[in-house]
Structures are given as C-alpha cells and as structure tokens.
Image (cartoon, coloured by chain):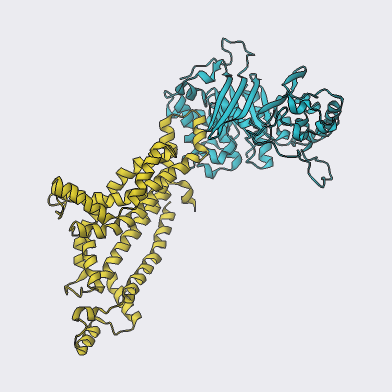
Amino acid sequence: MARYALQRILLALPLLFGLSLLVFFYVRIIPGDPVTAMLGVQANPDLVARLRAQYGFDEPILDQYLMWLGNVLQGDFGISFRSRQAVAPIIVDRIPATLQLMLGGLFVSLVVAIPFGIRAGMKYRQRSDTVISTITLVGLGSPGFWLGTILMVIFALVLKWLPSQGYTPFTQDPVASIRYMILPSVAIGLVGAPFLVRVVRSTVVEIMKEPFVPYADARGLREQVIFWRYIIRNLLPQFVVVLGVLVGALLAGSVAIEALFNWPGMGRIFIGAVTERDYAMIQALILVYGVIFVVINLIAEIAQAALDPRIRLK
Amino acid sequence: MHERTSATGSREPDAPVLEVTDLAVEFMTRSGPIRVVEEVAFRVRPGEIVGLVGESGSGKTVTMMSVLRLVPPPGRITAGRIIVDGTDVRSLSRDGMRGLRGSAVALIPPDATAALNPVVKVGDQVMEGVRSHRPQVSEAEARTLALEMFRRVGLPRPEQRLRRYPHELSGGMQQRVLIASALQMAPRLILADEPTTALDVTIQAQILRLLLAVRDEFGTAILFVTHDLAAVAEICDRVLVMYSGRLVESAPVADLFGQPLHPYTRALMASIPPLSADPPDRLQTVAGAPPEPGSWPEGCRFAPRCDLRTQLGGPDVCTTSQPPLVEVRPGHHAACHFATSEAGVRAATDLAATVEEAEAVVLPESVQPGGAA
C-alpha cells in the first residue's frame, strides 16, 4: 500500500512538470502582447522596448521558462502587470474563499447525488430511475451561471432569505459566512450533481449485475448486509476516483459562480486577469488550479487503492 | 427464522429432502409469457446425488433456481409444488425464504471468482453467512466454524486463507471456499450449478471428489446441474435429463449409461469424444440446434433432431402427441413413444459399450479430494 502511494506520488511529478510547461507556453500562444495591453497600441516604441526588456520578454523563450520555473519553485509568481504588486500574496489571500466554496459545492453535490444515484441504480429502468434520470438530464444541460441567477432571483430578490452577494471569512463570523456561501454552493453543487448521479447510477447498475449479488441473495444474507457490504462497499473505490474528477469540474464551475455572486475567490481575479492579459497572474492561477486538481486526484487514487485490494497489488 | 427438522427429526428418515411436482416457469415478455420449464417433477432423497443434465437453454438452471425461488427476472414460477425438507417453498414469506436460502438449501455457483465479493476477505464472507442466519453467534464462534470448514474442504493453512482476498486464491481454492461456505450451516441439500466449469480439468476432478466426500461425510443431498456427462457418471446416483424445458429421462446412473432409453440421451452420450488412442477426425455432435423457448414444436420437442424417428421412417405420432414421462423399467423413466421399440433398444445397447469404455478413464484414481487445488 505504501509502495503504491509512493509510486503514485512519483508519477504525479512529471504531471506537474507538464502542467508548468503547458501553463507557461499556453499564455505565450495567446495573441496580444502584455506590454501593448498595458500601454495601448499607440505607445512609444522605445517605451515598449524598455518594458519588454524589463520583464525579460526579449530573452530566448527557454530562458524565460527556466527563470519563471525557478522563481515559482521559490514561491515567487512574479509581478502583476496591472496592479504592479506581487502575484503570490494576492492569490494566497483568495485560496481560502475558493476552497470554502468548493467544499460547499462538493457537499451539495454529494448530498443530492449519492441517494438519488444509488436509488436510480438499484431501481434500474423502473419508475424512480426514469424520474431521476430525466431530471439529471435536464440538470446536465443547465449551466452554472444560469442556475445561479435563478437561485439568486428566487431566494435573494423575491424571498429575501439569503444575501445575493458577498463574503465573510468563516473564522470571523461562521454563521454569516455560511449564509453567504449557501447560494453559490448550491449553484456549483447542482452543476456537479447530475454528473455524479449518472456515474453512481451506472456503477451501481454494473455492481448489481455482478454474480456475487444474486449469490449473496442465494446465501440468505440480510438485505442490509447485501446493501452495505456488497453494493456500497464495491461502489466506494470507484466513487472516490470520480470525486477527484468532480472536484475539477467544480473548480471550473466556480470561476463563473464567483463572478456572479461577487465571491472574493481565485475565480474572480482570474476573469479580470484574462481580460487584461495579466500574464503573471494567469500563469499563477492556472498553476494553482492545476496543482489543487492534481493533488486531489492523487489523494483519490490512493484512497481507491486503500478501498480496493485488487489495485494495491499492481 | 425458518425452523427445520434435523436429519434425525420427527419425520421419516427416508422422506425426500426435495420434492418437485409439476413445476412450470414462464418468462414474462412484452409479447406474452414464454414457458421455459414445464411439468418437471422429481425427488432428491437424503444423501443422494442427483445429476440434472441438458444443453444450454434446456431449463436445468432455471429448475434448480426455482428451488430457492431465485429465478432471474422476468422469469416466474407459475405452477407446481416445491417441497424442501417438508417445507412448501412457494408458500414461504420473504423472511422465511431468506431463512431457507444458505441454510437448509445451499448453492454452489458456477464461477467462484465472480461469486465472491472482490473487496472483502474470504473469511469474512464465509462468516457473514452464519452471522446473517444466526445473529446470536459471536464473531469468534463464526471464525472457529469457518476455520473448521476450511479444513474440512482441504484448504491448506486455513488460518492464513481466512485473511486472503478472493483474487489472492486460485480458482480451485475459491471453489473450495464456496463449498466451505455452503457446508457451514449443515444444509440438507446442496444445489451445485456447474461447480466445475470454470476450473482446469485436474482441479475439476478434485472438486468432484470433494463433493462426493461431502456427501459421504455430511450426508448432504446434492442436486448437480451440469452438461458434463463424464462428471455425472463419476459422482451421481441418479440422473435427470432435460430437453426444451421438460424431463425426458430419469434413471439410476448405471441404468442410464447401461441402457439410455431416450434418443436425446443417446445423442448426448455419443457426443462424448472417445478416449481411445486415435482421436476421430470429426467430433460427434447432436445434429441441429435445440428449439428456442416459445417456438417449441408440436408433439415431442426432440422430434426434429431425432435419429430414431428418422430410422423409423418419421412416424406421425412424434409430431402430434407429446410423449409423457413413463416408467419404462423399474426406476427408469423416459419420455419417448418408441423407448422400447426394437430399433431403440438396439441403439441403446450399441452405445452402452462405447460409454463403458469412456467412463473407465474419466478420472485418474490418483486424484484425491483432500489435496490443494
């Protein structure tokens, strides 16, 4: 088991390296020059040249990459072109808000998707499955910002139950913090839930087809034993892996939701950074999102191995 | 929980452990019910090993699963009585049925690898059977019982085996685990559904011998469903032959192989490859394919494939009237209009000689039941 975990961790390193390459070069491929973006198209060519030299844009691209990577490894993500401030502290300030929203969204997804997914899978092609699957299909086609807007109109504007905008750190005032996070969490969670319902449903259907389920019945095992030990226990290893993927989807969804609910997470500065071609900021944000995603999936894979003895062997 | 009389209970000792009368099973489809089993009737006496043979789709597994009331949907038992050890299975409640399954009647499934829960240690899986049926049994007692059963089925180093996951055991050992699991509740009847098909030939022999040993030691009756006539010859006391959802022949094993009365049984036997030095250029098969349920022919269902009928010049009675299963000789039943015709008897005697030769070499004597699989 420890060997498997170590192996997975070592395999994650080249993945992170690949991520750094992608992040760095992806930003260079986007048309438009940051200096032009800063100074405008009619800027003095001398000034442009000076600034390019100052930021190192006239160096060979490989040197630029190595310099950037070296700095990143030391926690230096560069200076924002827009605010002229160091990028790293800005992002670090915003990570807790994004993580809080992600956990809220994850919670909503799980609470909605687990019971309905299992129910649909166990009642495969029966009425409750048809109802759940139809609603799921509608959910899959509903974008987060649209859902979020609807929620906001109903619960904030009409019913006035919850605030539509804003944020309070959890450590400062937990109750207010939770009140603020409910609507955006539900919006994100409901985007992830249909995906999770589908995966749980099809996994349960597959498990129910395994000969060990009817055989457990033929042994006269109690229904609770069959449910927990046969169905749920076999669902878990595959479920944790899907959770890793789901976190990625929630992170992606959170960008739009943060903007919509004025939630001071990474997503909000991300949108600003993209429109302003704030290279250093874009790079740093993609990298942080990527690392969160890789780490979560690494944990999911190790958890899967802990839950499924057949994987540990490999 | 379901109460049952023990082997030495108040009922007469020779009363059958399983009595099936006029069983019919139908599959409910959109275009109406399709019969897959009908008029099946047989008995299994205590300590008896009864083979139930037939081609795929003949209804043998459906018949066997009916005993546990576990015919897979959309199948449904629509008629007949199934009496297990004095209990009418069809009248049992849900809980009563669960009490019977794995307790008075245990199943040994065809593919042990697929039947074991891949993420739970085999010891825990065996123990959960006892603990489900008798909640008052402690974990420690269940473990002791499981250990004892592992020993009895010849699993080497049973303490270690208990802690293994299914994928860490060979196919033969997995099948032994399932047999141990089946035995721990001291069932009166074991339903063995092709218990050796997923195994290597040498392991098959070991498992067959183990089943024999189980019968001898525990006095458990076994209904042995298979399409392997060689295995039947090796361990069964009596044989039931099924074709297209009906029993076509039923006889003590020696009588069946000595004088098979039904043309289908003979065709099955003729398709066993001879074990002589020179293998035949072509393997013999039963000509044609069995009819699909729902499109069974009028009269005898085997008539279209029957070579006896061809020999006799295609008598009309075969395609107009269904031959009933009648006692042709003492203890030997067959469902053929011409079971005792001259041509039929000649065919039976000719075949018997070949089969006797094959039977002698089916299992090498050196294979012992206690060995590791």
In the shown orientation, is residue B175 left or right of residue B165?
right
Can residue B141 be seen here? no
- Spot occupied by residue A312 in the image (x, y as percentages of width and height): 46, 50
In the shown orientation, is residue A114 left or right of residue A219?
left
The relative height of residue A65 versus residue B306 in the rendered view (above or below) is: below
Image quadrant for the C terminus of chain B? top right
- The residue positioned farthest toward the bottom in the image shown: A46
Tell me, what hue is chain B? cyan
- Spot occupied by residue A96 in the image (x, y as percentages of width and height): 21, 57
Name the residue nearer the viewer: A61 or B248. Answer: B248
The relative height of residue B75 versus residue A20 in the rendered view (above or below) is: above
Residue drawn at x 78%, y 32% as measured from the top left: B266
> Looking at the rendering, which quadrant does residue A276 occupy?
bottom left
Name the residue nearer the viewer: B238 or A171. Answer: B238
Residue drawn at x 24%, y 84% as measured from the top left: A52
- Spot occupied by residue A20 in the image (x, y as percentages of width and height): 34, 70
Name the residue nearer the viewer: B53 or B136. Answer: B53
In the shown orientation, is residue B330 left or right of residue B129?
right
Residue drawn at x 19%, y 71% as measured from the top left: A86
| Chain letter for the part of the structure drawn in yellow | A
Residue drawn at x 40%, y 45% as measured from the top left: A200
> Looking at the rendering, which quadrant does residue A26 occupy?
bottom left
Image quadrant for the N terminus of chain B? top left
> Looking at the rendering, which quadrant does residue B71 occupy?
top right
Can residue A305 be seen here? yes
- Spot occupied by residue A7 in the image (x, y as percentages of width and height): 43, 59
